[in-house]
Amino acid sequence: MFNKLADFLRAQYPNFGFREVITPTIYKKSLWQTSGHWDNYADDMFEVRGRGATGQTENAREGQDEEFGLKPMNCPGHCLLFKSEKRSYRDLPIRYADFSALHRNEVSGALSGLTRVRRFHQDDGHIFCRPSQILEEIKLTLDFVGMVYKTFGLGPYKLVLSTRPADHYIGTPEEWGRAEDQLKAALDASGRDWSINEGDGAFYGPKIDIILKDSDGKEHQTATIQLDFQLPQRFELEYTAPAPELERRGEVTPDTDPALLFESGPVTPVIIHRAILGSLERFLSLLIEHYDGKYPFWLSPRQAIVLSVSQEPAELKYVDEVTKQLSKQWYGDRPAPLDHIYHNVDQDTSARSLGKKIREAKSKGYNFIAVVGPNDVAKGTLTLEMWNHRVKDHGSSEGYVEGEAPGSSRDLYGLLTK
Amino acid sequence: MFNKLADFLRAQYPNFGFREVITPTIYKKSLWQTSGHWDNYADDMFEVRGRGATGQTENAREGQDEEFGLKPMNCPGHCLLFKSEKRSYRDLPIRYADFSALHRNEVSGALSGLTRVRRFHQDDGHIFCRPSQILEEIKLTLDFVGMVYKTFGLGPYKLVLSTRPADHYIGTPEEWGRAEDQLKAALDASGRDWSINEGDGAFYGPKIDIILKDSDGKEHQTATIQLDFQLPQRFELEYTAPAPELERRGEVTPDTDPALLFESGPVTPVIIHRAILGSLERFLSLLIEHYDGKYPFWLSPRQAIVLSVSQEPAELKYVDEVTKQLSKQWYGDRPAPLDHIYHNVDQDTSARSLGKKIREAKSKGYNFIAVVGPNDVAKGTLTLEMWNHRVKDHGSSEGYVEGEAPGSSRDLYGLLTK
Ligand SMILES: [Zn+2]
Ligand SMILES: [Zn+2]
């Protein structure tokens, strides 16, 4: 299911302009000093040492004998990627997505010395954009959030905007004002209710939190959209744009004006950190509760089971054949194509009564339950007991098959009813 | 391309009985002591330390204040997975595949203090099997190797069996003899030439190396199949089997004999370490050389390009439309399905001459080159200049489209010629 979640997002990324990148797990200490993590976050970070990377050479130059840090987040790595090429305003926005494992060293429990390694995966993404592009990017991100939560049938959720703190913030009140106005416009355009947490933003930028209500009314903070004015400065990121003064203020000039093009100059991009699901592990536990064992077909770890009526050898052989066929095992010399999707199909050929086997399969939450009896072997048929959690006599199956979102049970349904 | 390689193997894994697992990046020191890595491999490993994991508490019990090690290989993690449940002979073989990042601290260059972090990804897999299953598993693995190398058009390759060293080995000569006989039988069954490196095996088991010859005649060791009698002992792995004495010798007893079943007992499984591609990074560099810029469609980072003849606004707009359509951008409210495959489609609408643009696109190795002229806009057509590296007038396109292996250019070809 973990892989399915990541695959689901991967299938959407190109439409939302994201490129998936694979970035290192450990970086030299100096990177974490640039990002500010080494100073502010040291206790929660793991240091990595080894031969030639001890951090103990006196007067070592940067890059020499440095220890490493295990990454607690992807942003610094993505900043390096952005910086690896010269960027023009035409290249922006640039959007990176990353499913890397992240490590945080969090103390849990009162017992001193007890360390909880938190290793988790985030559907992490960073958008590097022009100040004038904040509105469009936030809109697009809110659309993405909406589409994903609708797919899982999650919600309702609240949108909360946190604005500039009263003191201790970077940049000017005007910069904040312009950014917050764009966030507000995007929130308005989303057509959803949103509220404001005045002064509750981080010192480096305003943010939007998505707060999900579960069926018990409990609230979970899942997705976040965080603007960042600081990191691009720390990493000295820049892109070239005409009329840099105007560009910095988020004013776009027609690039057909040769005079303005002539005075091109460097501008610092804005970074938007965003996660749609948040921690995949935590989101998965939300889904487990949400679906209560009745997963949609595409996400289900138990997509189908084939039950035998008896233990006749011919019947068992037929059950095997049906199982292979339904699981879409791939035959032949040629490799299975990249878009081949297998089904998780089990079988129960135990000597227990059919009634017992059906009850157990139902309680285990199989999407499809198929029964094979002695008559089926000769005729090459089977009986469908349940499909997508609906019992046979509850009506036609069409609706439930239709209801499927990103994968499809149509395939399997087709195999089962042909 | 990195992701495509992994996806390609993922599409084959279920057919070969592998389950992809996601395992941690860091493990406590005591695990690496069990595996023997901490003693024999310490210099090449990175230590990980942090709050509560300093390794500096005196008389600490195991698990208390231990430092961690960054994994250089997946085997110990997979051993823990195997050990996490009670196993019966009926459950075997159990096959885990893992694409995790691995870290090795290798000294490169003469300058002391210079560390080369080697972070790489392997298409790593471990098979836990009964002594009697070695033959079948090796056969299956050699089939897998053959299918993969054929797909990439790589080869010829040599198979080399390394056998028991003269001294310093674990187990008995009889155990080695039985295992080597199974390896030889599997090599014979492969129908390929193979040779033997007498006495060249590791102390913990015999192995088969796959040595690939590139177009320059240079040899590359890529895939390996390594038997391991030691690791299962170090981790005290076991499964329950009837007649354990016979089972250990690789003799299978009919499990219908109630007397034998009655005397079930624990047996140590054999581990087969195997990698088909080896390091994905290194394999990728082999492929880059092998294809010399002319990738098969499914693997190609440049699947298609759309060229404009002029810079007429209507033409540019049409180029945009065609590009979106060919790249299979997903429309609509519903999310893209999991098996949706996008195409990498670029465009060149620069003011240069069409001839220049075509030449550049050819030299860049695009699989498909499509040209849009003023007449095409009205008629909704385009001209195909090249498909799968074949120029228009070299004959019918059918053959080249057919030649595609795991992905398919049929889709795109269909869009381009309809
Ligand atoms: Zn971030
Ligand atoms: Zn291994």
Image (cartoon, coloured by chain):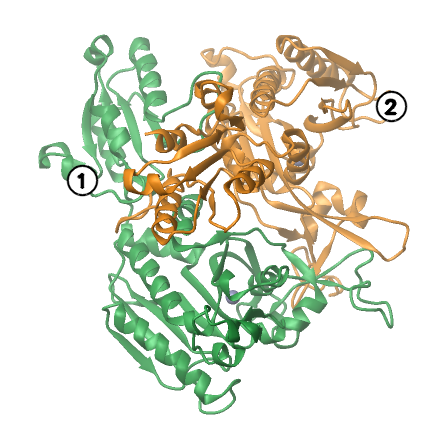
Chain colours: A orange, B green
**Residue B301 tag number:** none
View extreme (bottom): residue: B167
Disc 1: which residue: B400
Nearer to us in this view, A184 or B351: A184
Locate the C terminus of chain B and report the quarter of the image it occupies.
top left
Q: Is residue B300 visible?
A: no
| Quarter of the figure with residue A252 | top right
Label 1: how many Cα within 10 Å (few below 14, some 14–19, many 20+): some
Vertical comparison of A338 with B141: above or below: above
Nearer to us in this view, B411 or A129: B411
Amino acid type assigned to the residue bearing label 1 in the image: Tyr
Q: Is residue A182 visible?
A: yes
User: Alpha carbon of mark 1 to alpha carbon of mark 2: how far?
Assistant: 66 Å
Q: Label 2: state its secondary structure.
A: loop
Nearer to us in this view, A128 or B31: B31
Residue at position x 57%, y 18% in the image: A143
Amino acid type assigned to the residue bearing label 2 in the image: Asp
**Residue A167 tag number:** 2
Q: Is residue A5 left or right of residue B281?
A: right
Label 2 lies in what chain? A
Q: Position of residue A312 (x, y in %)?
A: 38, 51
